Amino acid sequence: MARVRHHEPMEPTDVLVIDAHTVRRLLPMAECIEVVAEALGALARDRAINPLRSILGLPFGGSALAVMPGAQVEPATFGVKVISVFPQNREAGMESHQGVVLLFEAEHGRPVAIVDASEVTALRTAAVSGAATRALARPDADDLAILGSGTQARTHLEAMLAVRPVRRVRAWSPTRSRLAGFAAEATERHGIAVEAVAEPRDAVEGASLVCTVSGAAAPIVRGEWLASGCHVNAVGSAMPTARELDGEAVRRSRLIVDRRESAMHESGDILLAIAEGAIGPDHLAGELGEVLIGALPGRTDADQVTLFKSLGLAVEDVATARAVYEAAMATGAGTKVRLA
């Protein structure tokens, strides 16, 4: 009779819990830009998996629950971001996005980290815009417009300063008190004057860099305002029924996205421009990852308007969470919790 082999029991699983403050401390913006650029390059080479996010509408005042799984072959990484979106949180002084990124090891599939998703989202979203700006904006782009005054305004200013020689910043937001607070805090933190302006047009006209990070459902940027040669990062809208840019702004631009599939399912900036006849589906030039690996040209001339439409991808979250986890393990940061 054959002997039955009994495997030795595995070691108990320790999961590292990493809070928002630790995420910010362990992963500077410049490093995160490199992390997400590598992840997008892997996606373009078919060395990563990023399905469409699953969104569950909740019966709580327009809120939702989103589930975003992703995996990367090298380094072997997989995980999932589970996040709630409660727009009304802003009125209470809280982040609208709440949740965690669950990170797993790839040998046995055990969970190894639970990372604050609000800060991961804030960091990686701006870092991707930083990677896009580095690849698509003119090298001398130095006049920045930021439309929005929340968390993404804060992190996008940091990302733009990391990749371009910004000398002027104009910011607009419909919430005047928050705009004033953002401008004052950003001016003190970065040592560059952030001018709060009355209308979106006052920020956009003449800017060589434009970041739209608002919660707007209808256009706040008109194509006629965009300066020749400017670069736009459109970030705030992530639903097919909402947009920050009008059709003319999209039509004027060389359009690059983070993921074609996501863009054609979720981007109101693109889908509504198609629906009104401003562009056709072939207006989408390609993905940022393709530009980063040299498979697709980015900017093709100095006067061209370039547009990066960001929706946010799970591979960005997982790669960022992994970088934070590795830094935490190296420095002894985080809190260990034993699951089994």
Image (cartoon, rainbow, N blue to C red):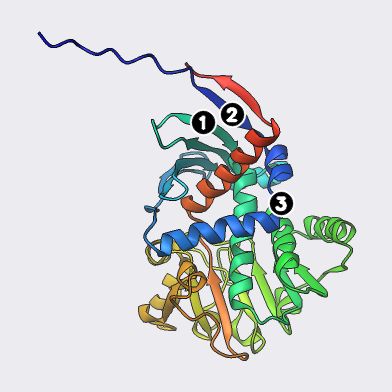
Identify residue type, mark 2: Leu
Q: Amino acid at mark 3?
A: Pro
Q: Is residue 188 left or right of residue 67?
A: right
Amino acid type, residue under disc 1 in the picture:
Val
Residue 72 percent across, percent down from the top left: 43, 50
Query: Residue 28 got which mark?
Result: 3
Residue at the outermost left position: 1
Q: Is residue 88 visible?
A: no
Of the numbered discs in the image, which one, if any, rests on residue 112?
1
Q: Residues within 10 Å of mark 1 (few under 14, many from 20)?
A: many
Q: Measuring 53% from the left and 67% from the top, which residue is drawn there?
A: 243
Query: What crowding class fits label 3: few (fewer than 14 Cα within 10 Å), some (14-19), or many (20 or more)?
Result: some
**Image quarter for residue 175?**
bottom right
What residue is disc 2 on?
A: 16
Picture layout, residue 228 above or below residue 261: below
- Disc on res. 46: none
Residue positioned 13% across, 11% down in the render: 2
Instruction: For the residues labelled 2 and 1, say whether their Cβ atoms are less than 8 Å apart.
Output: yes
Label 3 close to label 1 by CB (< 8 Å)? no
Q: How many neighbours does mark 2 have within 10 angstroms: few (below 14), some (14-19), or many (20 or more)? A: many
The CA distance from mark 3 to mark 1 is 22 Å
Residue at 57% x, 48% y is 320
Label 1 sits on a secondary structure element that is strand
* Residue 165 in the figure: left or right of residue 42: right
- First in sequence: mark 3 or mark 2? 2
Are the two marked residues, 3 and 2, in contact with CB atoms closer than 8 angstroms? no
